[in-house]
Amino acid sequence: MAYVFGRAKLKIGLAICLASATCLWQNFAHAASGAPASAGTPRHGSPKHMVARPGQAATAPVPHAGRKKAVEARGEEQISVTTSRQALNGGGGMMRIEHAPRNVQTVDHEYISMRNPSSTALDLIQNLPSVSISTPDPYGMQGGQIQTRGLTDLDMALLVDGAPAAAAKYITENVDTENVESVSLTPGSSETALPVMSAASGTMNETTHTPDKKFGGLVDFSYGTNNLSREFIRLETGEIGHSGVRGYVSFSNTHTRSWMGAGINDRRHVDFGLNKQWKNGSFAKAFVSWNWEDFTIDNYPTQQEFYKYKHTGEGYGRSANSNNINYWKNNTDYWNQVNLSAPIHIVLTRRIAFDLQPYYNLGRGWDASPGGTVTQNDGTTRNVTSYFLQGATERRGATAKLGIDVDRHNHVSFGYWYENNYTQQSYPTSYTQGNGAAPSPNWAAYRIDAGDQQNAGTEIHSLFVEDHAKYLNDKLDIQAGFKFVMSNTWNKDLYGRMSNNRTAPLPQLSVGYTIDEHSQIYLNAEGDYRQPSAVDLGWLYTSVPIPKNQYSIKEELGYRYHDQHIIVDASFFNYNVTNRIVNQYLGMNQFKPFSIGNQHMRGFDFMISGRPIHGFSPYASVEYLHAVQDSNVFDPYTNVMLNSKGTQAIMAPRVLANFGLTYKYAGFFGNASLHYTGPQSVSVAGDQRMPGFVTNTISLGYRFKPIGIAQSPTIKLNFANVTGSIVRTGAMGAIYSAKDPSTVYSGSLAPYTGYGNSFMTAARFTMTGTVSTSF
């Protein structure tokens, strides 16, 4: 930022520039830490100005180590104020300095920009200490799954700019990677005011791109293994007139083939962002995304199929033969999705502000899968396709909050959250087309029957109150809140309708104390819940009761340290979960919820990263988890009460470990990462297990100096599974025992009965090359 003034106005210019630098530093520090303004600074108005004496050099306050701001005077008429985003992170962006009184794990744009542009948020957080990530393909076409502290992404609130977004298995629908500034994970914790209905395992929030102040844009082109081709362009409006309004729009197109077996996958995506800020601190922001995809639904192997592939090379993917019922064009997912969020912050007075966050999601489409064969009157057989058809999956809601600075120490907020979550779905059957492909389930010429039809939904009303207090010169940070959720859940099918009304009290207390400029301790305790989503409920007929809400009580104790050399974060946690809800994979990318009683989890997370030393920035993290099933569970498939009490909780590996190393010199950059997940149980009975595994990635690139209109010409190569390991990375869902039967489709084989769980496996070695530049 630079201000240039005539000599006659030098004194005024110095004062204005110094005030602006002070304001920028305070806002930047608070935004980066997630903490509100200090007690000495009004939270909603402009910060108090600091004015330099006539003739005195302008200097900005120098914060603690790692947050440096340089103010450089150039002659008598120009002052330049600069800041470094990298001063807030370590490990090349794989870890960030945090100040919130709870565990927060963040990767920021420095790291994101080195990764494959087709990466999803799941790929970006795979080296955080609390998570183990499973993805079915190397290019994010189908999303994936998260395991965290003995829970899964189904227990987690997934957000974009603080608003609910698509589930992990469809996370690619949310936003393109180029438009992601940071991804933050708060394992086991969620803020009181967030609009979340499943936060037992915390929240994951993607922060989207802030529109640039100047007209320009970004373009990149990628090509890689599995015939990947991807194109992306973003156009920035800059400030429109003198309105203070800035915006951008982007488009991407991705095409690739399945890495296992036959299949073609296509995706088109549009992001649109708009931002307006006022001088008094008010702002309005809007983010809209549209996603269209048509991809091949992967096969997920049983343990037997996986070992056959590993030992003999015989795959389990879809068939390339159009006469085979398992032909890839008869196993497709066709989907359109729109996401909208529009947060507004209005400063009413210096002490009162109002926040409103409306959001809306709408998705429509269908999944196709083999439905067997039928015999015609002439004695010939004809293939049949079964569908999961969603006429609408809709979520609308809003959070309204009034915040008041009651005194110089306390900021009190009152709020209301409303959400309506609805799905309308059916299960039609059609004849397969003559070319082996699935027709649209809406084509009457192929329709056999409309199948069962269901709709289900949840309506939520919630009131909350929170007090955020700071004492001892802002060293003591206390956040105490209470949310009371009232929900009506219902499910309707051909056999009837059932519903229930439930409540959930959700208290929260977080305390942080800054010992000195380097150290902080924090304590967090809260209650969280989970209820089945409307889509999951659609798989429960009215003969099956709606599962009780899952409820969790959690405590966490942590310590942070940072200086000019390292950043350290350590936390200990304890969870107790009642009415644990897990999901069974049904095929066609759909899941059915069931309850497995109670469980408890205890453990610790540890993260450490280094600041650049001769260009090298190391990172490491580890988690130890002791998760135990506290209940025996009845298995309806084998009609047996499972002796599961006291066994290792399902999908809860005891050890997770990560290592990363970033190197930068001049225009060259590189990053290498390793992730280890320990052995785990994949059945409630504990009679089926999955061994530990290692995954890895490498990123290499070079940023050239500006050439004409190209402001940042860059080339980079991204590698995944460099060693070519054939490993399972996670179970597709929960099962009761290894004796549970399931219908299996494998390559060109006819459907047969398999047993036990099915799995995601690591895609084979992949390489992607990308050319990009801003302009």
Image: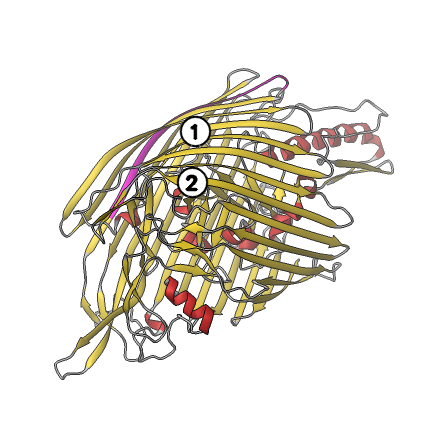
Mark 2 and mark 1 lie on one chain; the one further toward the N terminus is: 1
Q: Using the rendered image of the protein, determine whether residue 257 is visible from the camera's viewpoint.
A: yes
Q: Please determine whether, in this image, residue 525 is positioned above or below residue 275.
A: above
Q: Using the rendered image of the protein, determine whether residue 213 is visible from the camera's viewpoint.
A: no
Dot 2, how many residues are within 10 Å of its Cα: few (below 14), some (14-19), or many (20+)? many
Quadrant of the image for the N terminus? top right
On the image, which quarter does residue 297 sit in? bottom left
Residue where numbered disc 2 is placed: 627
Instruction: Residue lying at the far top in this picture: please name it.
Output: 407
Q: Any mark on residue 733, and which?
A: none
The kind of secondary structure element at disc 2 is strand
Range of magenta residues: 456-473
The kind of secondary structure element at disc 1 is strand
Q: Taking 563 as reference, is 327 left or right? A: left
Q: Amino acid at mark 1?
A: Glu
Q: Taking 3 as reference, is 372 left or right? A: left
User: Viewer-proximal residue, 496 or 682?
Assistant: 682
Considering the whole magenta stretch, tell me its main secondary structure: strand
On the image, which quarter does residue 460 sit in? top left
Report x, y in % for residue 443.
25, 69
Q: CA distance from mark 2 to mark 1?
A: 19 Å
Q: Amino acid at mark 2?
A: Ala
Report x, y in % for residue 625.
48, 41
Residue where numbered disc 1 is placed: 526
Report x, y in % for residue 620.
62, 46
